[in-house]
């Protein structure tokens, strides 16, 4: 795991975009974002039970696993959005970046790789991309039934006062 302020330069989202400003785990914790390095699946199971997680699925994000839709999927994951439940991502292989919004509305980029586990609080704006290796294998843990609904920020903003949950994009 490595976290830093995203450099906001245009160009391929899968490049590091490292501004050189590091972000500490403590700063992540202040935003309600928790990070754990957990090589043992047993510990993940314990954590999930303690936090009341009932469901999980496994996803491989790669051209080999997804075929022609890979590009679109990665584009969709990279649209700024939030979820109504806390959720856990446990990386089993490959690498990728979760970008989350700081209090100042900067992007904090979190690089995750095998055995990294990230807990995102409910309601935090984020987006995800693979890196140049175009491969991530992850377990997604959900509190209840998997909720694929992502509330897209751009959609909400453009609708002004209309309730955000009317704008839904399927994330399955
Ligand atoms: C999300 O919520 O943005 C995702 O689940 C991205 C794919 S999981 C590595
Ligand atoms: Ni998401």
Image: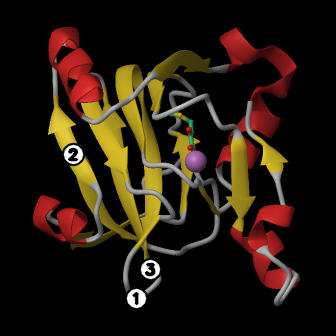
Viewer-proximal residue, 77 or 46?
46
* Residue 129 found in image quarter: top right
- Marks 1/3 in contact by CB < 8 Å: the verdict is yes
Q: Residues within 10 Å of mark 2 (few under 14, many from 20)?
A: many
Q: At x 82% / y 54%, what residue is drawn?
A: 168
Q: CA distance from mark 2 to mark 1?
A: 21 Å
Q: Residues within 10 Å of mark 3 (few under 14, many from 20)?
A: some
Residue 162 rendering spot, x and y as whole percentages: 86, 81
Q: CA distance from mark 1 to mark 3?
A: 6 Å
Classify mark 3: helix, strand or loop: loop
The image shows a total of numbered marks equal to 3
In terms of sequence position, does the residue under pointer 2 or pointer 1 come before the other? 2
Residue 56 rendering spot, x and y as whole percentages: 49, 20
Classify mark 1: helix, strand or loop: loop
Tell me the mark number nearer the camera, choosing from 2 and 3: 2
Classify mark 2: helix, strand or loop: strand
């Amino acid at each position: 795991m490595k976290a830093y302020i995203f450099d906001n330069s245009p160009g391929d989202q899968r490049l590091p975009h490292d501004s050189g400003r590091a972000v500490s785990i403590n700063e992540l914790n202040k935003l309600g974002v928790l990070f754990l390095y957990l090589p043992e699946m047993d510990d993940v199971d314990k954590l999930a039970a303690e936090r009341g997680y009932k469901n999980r699925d496994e996803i491989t994000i790669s051209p080999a696993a997804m075929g022609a839709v890979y590009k679109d999927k990665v584009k969709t994951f990279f649209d700024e959005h939030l979820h109504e439940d806390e959720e856990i991502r446990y990386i089993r292989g490959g690498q990728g970046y979760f970008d989350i919004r700081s209090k100042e509305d900067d992007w904090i980029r979190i690089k995750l790789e095998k055995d990294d586990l990230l807990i995102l609080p409910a309601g935090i704006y984020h987006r995800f991309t693979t890196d140049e290796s175009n491969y991530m294998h992850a377990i997604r843990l959900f509190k209840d039934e998997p909720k694929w609904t992502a509330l897209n920020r751009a959609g909400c903003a453009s609708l002004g006062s209309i309730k955000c949950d009317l704008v839904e994009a399927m994330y399955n």
